Image (spheres, rainbow, N blue to C red):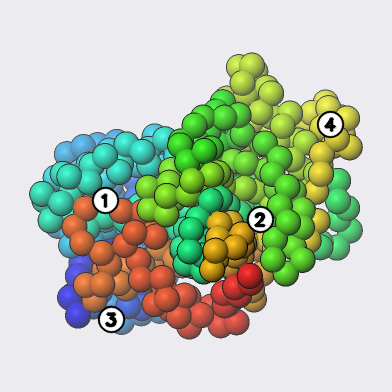
Amino acid sequence: MTTMKVLALGGAGVTGRVAARVAAALPGVHELVIADRDLAAARRAAAALAAATAVPVRAQRVDVTDPAGLHAALGEADAVLNTVGPYYRFGLDVLRAAIRARTDYLDICDDWEPTVAMLELDGEARAAGVRAVIGMGASPGVSNLLAARAAARLDTLTDVYTAWPVDAGPRPGGSPSDTSLPESSLRDANGAVPAAAVHWMQQISGTVAAVEGGRIVRRPPLRPVTLDLPGGHRGTAYTVGHPEPVTLHRSLRPTGEAANLMVVRAGTAAYLDVLRTDLDAGRLSNETAAADLAGPTLRRVLRAAARAPRLRGPGTLPPFFAAATGTRDGRPAAALARLTGADGLLADMAEATGVPAGLALAQLLDGTLGPAGVHPPEAAVDVERFFRDLARECPGVEVVEEL
């Protein structure tokens, strides 16, 4: 077991605090630094964590837009957990700095554009002896590992889809056409719109990566995909610009389609489509669109209400899953890998994203996390080990596979 000083970059944020909490409980972490551009927030987070763990925890001010300060902080650490987003702004620069500092790296990058650029740093990371895993959150992250589980049940792979929940599932007072989302996903603890919401607006506008005919293409997001899955799970989900198509194209090599999907009610899909229209027309920025989603305007609600009847809902699709099609024993086959017992985990974006990142650090500490280089989760993480660790961290969570 290697002992490490870990830099929790962005560790004062909601997701960073979760990742740091998980990291502090791991054997082999001998010091944890909560690094954030807001030093007061970092000190509060460090004090709270120090009171709950025996590992030394301290705070440090680090601004990722300050190259010299970032390099200095990384140079003092053995590994960095980077939860600073949105990644289309900051991800590539932080990874490049980690490679230069020869610091092992984990993040939760959920933007496909920097994922492409970050994977191109693989040679530099190998030369520097740096192990880097990008996108180790919920989606991407857990979703990639579910895709690997599903694909492993087939002899050949044609299509692979990963999916995560937005607002699907029963809620008191909810209807299939409403657009009310969990408040925790739209505002941070201070009432501000979080980076995750800004990222979301980036990935429902313009064009996003998908795989068609075994090749990466760019298509408008919010394309409906209707699935008929093993176990009687049927419904429609909508495409979004997460990195899974990019990385699964490299690792699993589907010959047909790959896409990341949102399991979302028709009414919410319609409202997102209205925001997309206004984003693409330049009437909204990512920031103003995210703020609008947190406080929908009457005019856009009415526009969405007119679109909603034309859209299909999630039906009986699981909330969080990966599905693959191909052949098994010479016959067409489909495989589904889904999480069960995860309602509580998936209801909290910070937990769903921060816990997997922290658990991946455990494999870095014991030397089982892939070789040097830049890797997506499915190419570096021991899948079976990860899901065992997840079940211990979140009792009741397990993977169910269906053919």
Mark 3, Cα crowd under 10 Å, few <14 / some 14-19 / many 20+, is some
Residue behind mark 3: 27
* Disc on the earlier residue, 3 or 4: 3
Q: Position of residue 254 (x, y in %)?
A: 47, 49
User: Relative to 19, is 312 on the left or the right?
Assistant: right
Q: Are marks 3 and 2 in contact (CB under 8 Å)?
A: no
Q: Evaluate whether residue 257 shows in this view.
A: yes
Q: Are marks 3 and 1 in contact (CB under 8 Å)?
A: no
Q: Report the Cα–Cα distance between label 2 and label 1.
A: 28 Å
Q: Position of residue 29 (x, y in %)?
A: 25, 74
Q: Report the Cα–Cα distance between label 3 and label 4.
A: 52 Å
Residue behind mark 2: 165
Q: Amino acid at mark 1?
A: Val
Instruction: Identify the residue shown where x is 54% and y is 68%.
Output: 329
Q: Position of residue 310 (x, y in %)?
A: 85, 35
* Disc on the earlier residue, 1 or 4: 4
Q: Which label was assigned to residue 374?
A: 1
Q: Report the Cα–Cα distance between label 3 and label 2.
A: 33 Å
Q: Which label was assigned to residue 307?
A: 4
Q: Report the Cα–Cα distance between label 1 and label 4.
A: 42 Å
Say what secondary structure mark 1 lies in.
Answer: strand
The quadrant of the rendering that contains the C terminus is: bottom right
